[in-house]
Image (cartoon, helix red, strand yellow):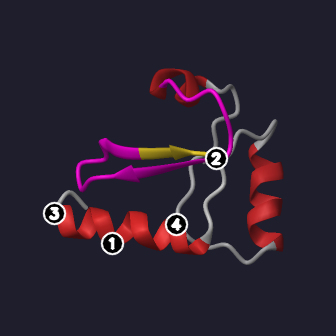
Amino acid sequence: MWTCRTIQAARWFLDEHDIDYPHAVDVDGELLKELGVRGLPVTLALDADGRVIDRVVGQLTSEELQRLIDDLLRSGDA
């Protein structure tokens, strides 16, 4: 999720870094408020119905991200 001032700025960043996985752009910060997230970066894990089932505020290493994914897959929530 991005909190850019414009959708164009988010699109530029994603294109510049060849990032092609889905993103949400939260221009007004409303989604962050609704989710109760106060800091960035934030990683949200969603279930098949789009519900937030886990969140990590702060930067993740690749190992931490892999551990989160593995835990979610083991729990059956993913």
Report the amino acid beneath label 3.
Gly
The residue singled out by tag 1 in the image is 70
Q: Where is residue 30, by image quadrant? A: top right
The residue singled out by tag 4 in the image is 64
The residue singled out by tag 2 in the image is 58
Task: Work out whether mark 1 precedes mark 3 in sequence or the reverse, and give the earlier one.
Answer: 1
Task: Work out whether mark 3 precedes mark 4 in sequence or the reverse, and give the earlier one.
Answer: 4
Report the amino acid beneath label 4.
Glu
The residue singled out by tag 3 in the image is 76
Tell me, for residue 60, which label it has, or none.
none
Between the residue at mark 4 and the residue at mark 1, the CA separation in whole angstroms equals 10 Å
Question: Depth-wise, is mark 3 or mark 4 nearer the camera?
Answer: 4
Q: Secondary structure at mark 2?
A: loop
Q: Secondary structure at mark 1?
A: helix
Q: Secondary structure at mark 3?
A: loop
Residue 39 percent across, percent down from the top left? 66, 33
Judge whether residue 57 is colored magenta: no
Tag 4: Cα neighbours inside 10 Å, few (<14), some, or many (≥20)?
few
Between the residue at mark 3 and the residue at mark 2, the CA separation in whole angstroms equals 24 Å
User: Which region of the structure is painted magenta?
Assistant: 36-54
